Image (cartoon, grey):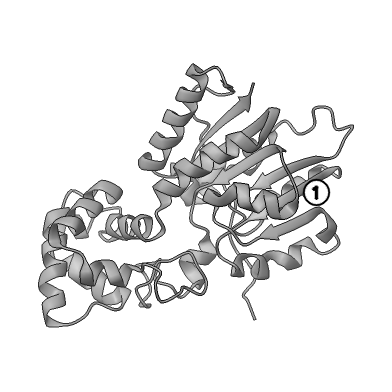
């Protein structure tokens, strides 16, 4: 049986209020929750707005199993589609919907995926080195194990630096290549040990865990997260009604840069209005209750 979701939703009020769903609620509205995760945003929307329906997307099929108990009695107002948000157009087609009134992207990895997936997202647990968002990956799906055992030293260094912004990327890549000559790297525990052996001791004692950036880089590469985001934003804007709003929460500079650039481009093309010129960040109280919210940035646009 799927464990119930324990994920804490970041910037919940700000994200939902930013959609301005209370404007003209005469007719039924539809919100697309592109990153269902633990269901926090979807549930809050259904509770606040009785005339709003939610189409929830997640490429992890187990996300709905873990969260569906929260939606008892509201099943008619939410439909779950097991799709990556780069395929928003396909998901809406399945639901027979052309345009939506609001869209949410919460780009953070849910606590459930970090702590309960068993797929190697966390460097705090010794698990198979998969890092794929898919619950049941196919043999042809790329995994972190494929990358660390098969990619060249240069390619490894490039993604660890490019996607993880890790300054010791070359040393770590060299260490990975040396280690895999002796034995295949199949578990997160092996990878953490290799990273630890190839960074300075002061770095190992830093505030941020020394494996954080390498794990982030591998996860982004495995799931093509940045490519998905670019496609998802474009298709999302296309699916938005005139006057509809899009809220995007990012958690690291690479994502935020893509979102910021996309928003600026569309503003220049006079297709959107930027609701907040500077990103909305979590208040001290929220950071205290949920340290993960510290790095969250929310940007909202409205379609012209």
In the picture, which quadrant includes the N terminus?
A: bottom right
Q: Is residue 101 above or below residue 302?
A: below
Q: How many marks?
A: 1
Q: Is residue 245 above or below residue 224?
A: above
Describe residue 167's horizontal placement relative to residue 280 as left or right. Answer: left
Q: Position of residue 159 (x, y in %)?
A: 25, 53
Q: Position of residue 13 (x, y in %)?
A: 66, 39
Looking at the rendering, which quadrant does residue 151 occupy?
Answer: bottom left
Looking at the rendering, which quadrant does residue 240 occupy?
Answer: top right
In the picture, which quadrant includes the C terminus?
A: top right
Q: Is residue 9 above or below residue 276?
A: below
Is residue 40 visible in the rendered structure shown here?
A: no
Describe residue 189's horizontal placement relative to residue 293 as left or right. Answer: left
Q: Nearer the viewer, residue 219 or 5?
A: 219
In percent of the image, x 43 and y 66: which residue is there? 132
Residue labelled with disc 1: 47
Say which element carries label 1: helix
Q: Nearer the viewer, residue 208 or 58?
A: 58
Looking at the rendering, which quadrant does residue 222 occupy?
Answer: bottom left
Q: Nearer the viewer, residue 201 or 20?
A: 20
Q: Position of residue 285 (x, y in %)?
A: 56, 42
Describe residue 81's horizontal placement relative to residue 53 as left or right. Answer: left
Q: Position of residue 276 (x, y in %)?
A: 55, 24
In percent of the image, x 58 and y 30: which residue is there? 300
In percent of the image, x 16 and y 61: which residue is there? 172
Is residue 48 visible in the rendered structure shown here?
A: yes
Q: Is residue 79 above or below residue 28?
A: below
């Amino acid at each position: 049986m799927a464990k119930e979701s324990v994920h804490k939703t970041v910037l919940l009020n700000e994200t939902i209020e930013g959609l301005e769903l209370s404007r003209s609620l005469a007719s039924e509205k539809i919100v697309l929750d592109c990153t269902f995760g633990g269901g926090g945003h979807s549930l809050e929307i259904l509770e606040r707005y009785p005339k709003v329906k939610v189409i929830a997307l997640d490429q992890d099929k187990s996300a709905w199993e873990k969260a569906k108990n929260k939606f008892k009695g509201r099943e008619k107002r939410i439909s779950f589609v097991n799709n990556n948000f780069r395929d928003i157009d396909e998901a809406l087609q399945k639901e027979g919907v052309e345009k939506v009134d609001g869209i949410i992207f919460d780009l953070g990895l849910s606590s459930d995926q970090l702590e309960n997936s068993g797929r190697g997202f966390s460097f705090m647990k010794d698990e198979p080195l998969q890092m794929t968002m898919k619950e049941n990956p196919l043999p042809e799906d790329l995994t972190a194990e494929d990358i660390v055992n098969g990619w060249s030293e240069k390619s490894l260094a490039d993604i660890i630096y490019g996607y993880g912004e890790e300054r010791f990327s070359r040393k770590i890549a060299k260490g990975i290549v040396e280690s895999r000559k002796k034995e295949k790297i199949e578990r997160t525990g092996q990878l953490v040990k290799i990273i630890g052996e190839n960074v300075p001791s002061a770095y190992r004692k830093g505030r941020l865990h020394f494996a954080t950036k390498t794990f982030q880089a591998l996860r982004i590469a495995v799931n093509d997260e940045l490519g998905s985001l670019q496609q998802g934003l474009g298709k999302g804007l296309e699916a938005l009604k005139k006057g509809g709003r899009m809220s995007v929460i990012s958690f690291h500079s690479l994502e935020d840069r893509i979102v910021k650039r996309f928003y600026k481009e569309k503003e220049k093309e006079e297709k959107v209005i930027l609701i907040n010129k500077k990103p909305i960040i979590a208040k001290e109280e929220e950071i205290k209750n949920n340290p993960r919210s510290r790095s969250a940035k929310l940007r909202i646009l409205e379609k012209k």
